[in-house]
Amino acid sequence: MKKFFKRAGITIGIALLLLLAWGIIEPYTIAVEQETAEIPNLPQAWEGKDIAVLGDFQVGMWMDNDSVIPRAVDKIIEEEPQAVLLLGDYVYHPADDNTVQMEKVADALTPLEEADIPVFALLGNHDYAMDKKDDRVNQETADRVDRMLGEKGIRVLQNESVPLTLKNNEVTTNGENENTLYLGGLGASWPGNVDVPKALRNIPDNAPRLFMMHNPEAFKKLPPDSAPAAVAGHTHGGQIRIPFTPEWSYKDLGSKNAHVDGWTDESYGRNGNSLYVNRGIGFSLFPIRINCPPEITFFKLSAKA
């Protein structure tokens, strides 16, 4: 019996070591998720077009995987989407000066500017130097992130919308017509910047729209039928998901409705609204991902039947 338990212990130990080793390797892989975003009243010109999503780079964390970002950008350029959405948390450490980290981010995103693909972004809690909900809001660091993204031609949305109009198969933001899809972006939740009425103000009733936000919690504030397709980040997919149970992560231990990955169920948010949660690229606390690889999401747009 002692020999049995000894062998069992050795087997379990080896399995845990192998799992840990994979947890260190997996952050350098990339999963490309192809999803359909159903949008009522979607113009025919947008039918079948792709929107790419990236988020949560977390550059500056110990053993960060920032080398994945340029590879993800290259993959996006290869697929030629109509636009790219960035979901916030570009830097990790709450610091008075995040310039070095943001320079890495800006360099990694430069090829998108060179490829002339329009990019729209949000700010996340880490961009305000908030590691916890009750941390002090550092507006200076957030302004720096905003400015450095803007220098790369990236438009940062904070409780506003922008009309995306297809003209000769290219996206313009000047003018609205029958080929316009509205992109709405909410402010960051932890700094208390979510203003839903302001974000909806310039979107005509019944107009086709796609919403983006950093924290999935903001999705609950959107009124019914105002966000038939939306995307959020922030969760990193839970980082550690029990193999063979892809919807369960360690975050479920502290919350009955964690919603850390993929499409949320109908009970999350208001009627007529649908949210997809992107797993992001980087991580928090520990540089490990298990059964939860970094994600690029490609949304193929479709008019809802």
Image (tube, rainbow, N blue to C red):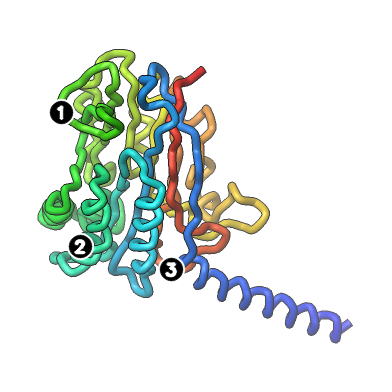
Residue 300 quadrant: top left
Amino acid type at image mark 3: Phe
Q: Which tag is nearer the camera, tag 3 or tag 1?
A: 1
Q: Residue at x 48, y 20 (%)?
A: 304
- In the picture of the structure, the residue carrying the numbered disc 3 is 286
The answer to which of marks 3 and 1 sits earlier in the sequence is 1
- Where is residue 62? Give x, y as percent: 34, 73
Q: Residue at x 43, y 30 (%)?
A: 301
Q: Is residue 43 above or below residue 250?
A: above
- Where is residue 205? Give x, y as percent: 29, 13
Q: Quadrant of the N terminus?
A: bottom right
- In the picture of the structure, the residue carrying the numbered disc 2 is 102
Q: Which tag is nearer the camera, tag 1 or tag 2?
A: 1
Q: Is residue 130 visible?
A: no
**Contact, mark 3 vs mark 2 (Cβ under 8 Å):** no
Q: Is residue 101 visible?
A: yes
Q: Is residue 237 above or below residue 197?
A: below
How far is the residue under mark 3 from the one under mark 1?
Answer: 43 Å
Mark 1 falls on what kind of element? Answer: loop
Q: Which tag is nearer the camera, tag 3 or tag 2?
A: 2
Mark 3 falls on what kind of element? Answer: loop
- Where is residue 180? Give x, y as percent: 27, 23
Amino acid type at image mark 2: Met
Seen from the viewer's position, the closer of residues 143 and 41 is: 41
